[in-house]
Amino acid sequence: MIAIQEIFDMRKIGRFSTLLALPLLCISFASAQSQLDVNVGFGTKSATSSDQVFDTFGDGRLFRTPSLTSFFMGVGGKIMLNNRFGVGAEAMFQPHRPDYAGLKIRNTFYDVHGIYQPISVKRAALQLKAGIGGTNSRFYFSDTGCSGFTGCSSYTQFAGSSNHFQVVGGVGVPLYITEHIFLRPEIDIHYVPNFFQYGTNFVPAATVWAGYTFGER
């Protein structure tokens, strides 16, 4: 069951990445002066605990909801239509599944955004972004079962999911190592209305993106 679910999750991310890439590529071909970036990212997102306590399994054991302080990774891309304005899209997810009140959880944040670049020099730039998207929280139940025939083994089952709208804003600084390869440290703020799984609707994030630029800067 866990293998099937993992494949489903990866296919979901893959489909989302493909959907993000298609409009970016279309815009790229439509404008000969455009610049296409593709990148992968690694970083963290954080949110306080809601401090709720649940009898998750109905057996008298109480579990407190945790805070969100976790490693994320993601994929993204952007098109700079000229030296000042562009559009982009990205998705970031937890590659692991941390504990959540007796269950396991995986959070995914995704968005499309506009980009304003007030400063651009040969090896660096300053980029401001703002956009909208969604947040998906998927819950899993893990346990161990034993059999006289097969012995003991662990298993994980999908237990449900919750979706939220989000608004995101951020600032990034692309630093070009070569003419086309860059690192982009970035700080974002996600506003997720009614993000009741945690104790705040504001989720700050810090990410380092590594990518490649197609076209001339």
Image: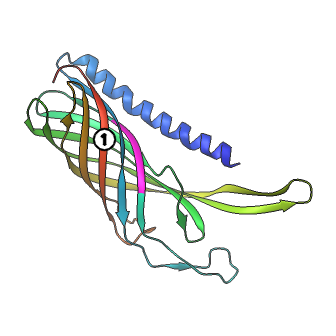
Q: Residue at x 11, y 33 (%)?
A: 84
Q: Position of residue 16 (x, y in %)?
A: 45, 37
Say left or right for 125 vs 99. left
Specify the segment rendered in magenta.
Answer: 71-76
Look at the image and say whether residue 74 sits in the magenta stretch.
Answer: yes
Figure check: 68 above or below 88:
below
Say left or right for 20 vs 144. left
Q: Which residue is drawn at 43% across and 34% down?
A: 17
Comparing 153 with 66, the one in front is: 153
Circle 1: element type: strand
User: Looking at the image, which residue sits at the far front?
Assistant: 177
Question: Which residue is under mark 1?
Answer: 209
Q: How crowded is mark 1: few (under 14 residues within 10 Å), some or many (20 or more)?
A: many
* The C terminus: image quadrant: top left
Image-quadrant location for residue 49? bottom left
Comparing 127 with 121, the one in front is: 121
Figure check: 14 above or below 50:
above
User: Looking at the image, which residue sits at the far right?
Assistant: 149
Q: Residue at x 37, y 71 (%)?
A: 48
Q: Is the magenta stretch mostly helix, strand or loop?
A: strand
Look at the image and say whether residue 104 sits in the magenta stretch.
Answer: no
Q: Which residue is drawn at 59% across and 58% down?
A: 160
Q: Where is residue 184 in the image (x, y as percent from the top left)?
A: 24, 41
Say left or right for 153 vs 216. right
Colouring method of the image: rainbow
Q: Where is residue 22 in the image (x, y as percent from the top left)?
A: 38, 26
Kind of residue at disc 1? Trp
Q: Position of residue 148 (x, y in %)?
A: 92, 59
